[in-house]
C-alpha cells in the first residue's frame, strides 16, 4: 500500500509539471509582447469557458456545450452525441499530461467556439480555470 501511494504521488507530480511547464511557456509568450503582464486569471478563464458564441457551424455554442459546467462529469459532444471523459485532471488523471494533445484540442475547440485560434493569454487563462475548478 505504501508503494502504491508513493507511485500515485510520482504520477500526479509528473502531470503537474507538464501543465506547469506549458503554462510557463505560454506566460513567456504573453510577456514577450506585454512585459507588464502579471499572470493568468481564473475569472477570465471562466468567462472564456462559459460564454456563448456563434461557432464554426453557425450555432450558438460554448465550451460548456460539450464539456458541461461540471468539469468532473462526463460530457457529450454537442454535434455527434459522443461521450467525452471529464475534463478536470482531478476526475480524469489522463488530462493535461501531453502538451501535444492539449494544443491539438485547444486549437480545434477554440475554432469550434470562436472561429479562430486562442491567443497565448486566452489559453493560459482557460487552462488555469479548468485545472483549478
Ligand atoms: C464540439 C464539442 C467541443 C467543444 C465545443 C469544446 N470541446 Fe474541448 N474537447 C472535445 C473533444 C471531443 C475532446 C477530445 C476527446 C477527449 O479527450 O475526450 C476535447 C478535448 C479538450 C481538451 C484536451 C485536454 C487533455 O489534455 O486531454 C481541452 C484542454 C479542451 N477540450 C478544452 C476546451 C475548451 C477550452 C473549449 C472552449 C473554447 C472546448 N474544449 C470546447 C470537444 C469539445
Image (cartoon, rainbow, N blue to C red):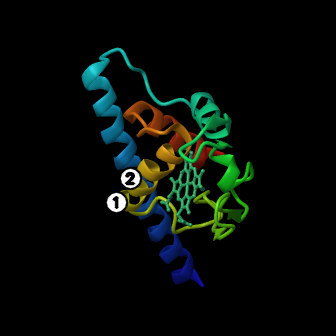
Position of the C terminus, as image quadrant, is top right
Which label is found at residue 100?
A: 1
Give how far across and how far down residue 28 sits, in percent. Answer: 29, 32
Q: Is residue 18 left or right of residue 43?
A: left
Q: Determine whether 122 is above or below 110 in the image.
A: above
Q: CA distance from mark 2 to mark 1?
A: 5 Å
Q: Is residue 113 left or right of residue 20?
A: right
Q: Does the image show residue 121?
A: yes
Q: Nearer the viewer, residue 62 or 8?
A: 62
Question: Does mark 2's beta carbon lie closer than 8 Å to ligand 1?
Answer: no
Label 1 CA crowd tier, 10 Å (few <14, some 14–19, many 20+): few
Give how far across and how far down residue 69 sits, in percent. Answer: 74, 48
The residue pinned by badge 2 equals 103
Label 2 CA crowd tier, 10 Å (few <14, some 14–19, many 20+): some
Q: Quadrant of ligand 1?
A: bottom right
Q: Residue 30 sits in which quadrant?
A: top left
Q: Does the image show residue 61?
A: no
Give how far across and how far down residue 13 sits, in percent. Answer: 45, 61
Q: Residue 67 sits in which quadrant?
A: bottom right
Q: Determine whether 33 is above or below 78 in the image.
A: above
Q: Determine whether 92 is above or below 128 in the image.
A: below
Question: Residue at the spot x=30%, y=41% of the render?
Answer: 25
Position of the N terminus, as image quadrant, is bottom right
Question: Residue at the spot x=68%, y=38% of the render?
Answer: 50
Q: Nearer the viewer, residue 110 or 87?
A: 110
Instruction: Tell me the SS state at disc 1.
Output: helix
Instruction: Tell me the SS state at disc 2.
Output: helix
Question: Residue at the spot x=67%, y=36% of the render?
Answer: 52
Q: Tell which residue pokes out farthest to the top in this image.
A: 36
Q: Tell which residue pokes out farthest to the front in this image.
A: 58
Q: Determine whether 8 is above or below 60 in the image.
A: below
Label 2 with label 1: CB-CB less than 8 Å: yes
Amino acid at each position: 500500500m505504501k508503494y502504491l501511494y508513493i507511485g500515485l504521488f510520482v504520477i500526479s507530480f509528473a502531470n503537474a509539471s507538464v501543465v506547469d511547464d506549458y503554462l510557463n511557456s505560454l506566460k513567456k509568450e504573453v510577456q514577450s509582447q506585454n512585459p507588464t503582464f502579471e499572470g493568468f486569471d481564473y475569472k477570465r478563464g471562466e468567462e472564456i469557458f462559459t460564454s456563448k458564441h456563434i461557432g464554426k457551424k453557425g450555432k450558438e455554442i460554448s465550451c460548456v456545450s460539450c464539456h458541461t459546467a461540471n468539469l468532473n462529469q462526463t460530457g457529450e459532444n454537442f454535434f455527434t452525441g459522443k461521450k467525452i471523459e471529464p475534463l478536470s485532471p482531478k476526475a480524469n488523471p489522463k488530462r493535461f499530461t501531453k502538451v501535444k494533445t492539449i494544443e491539438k484540442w485547444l486549437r480545434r475547440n477554440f475554432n469550434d467556439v470562436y472561429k479562430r485560434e486562442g491567443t497565448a493569454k486566452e489559453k493560459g487563462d482557460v487552462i488555469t480555470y479548468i485545472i483549478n475548478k
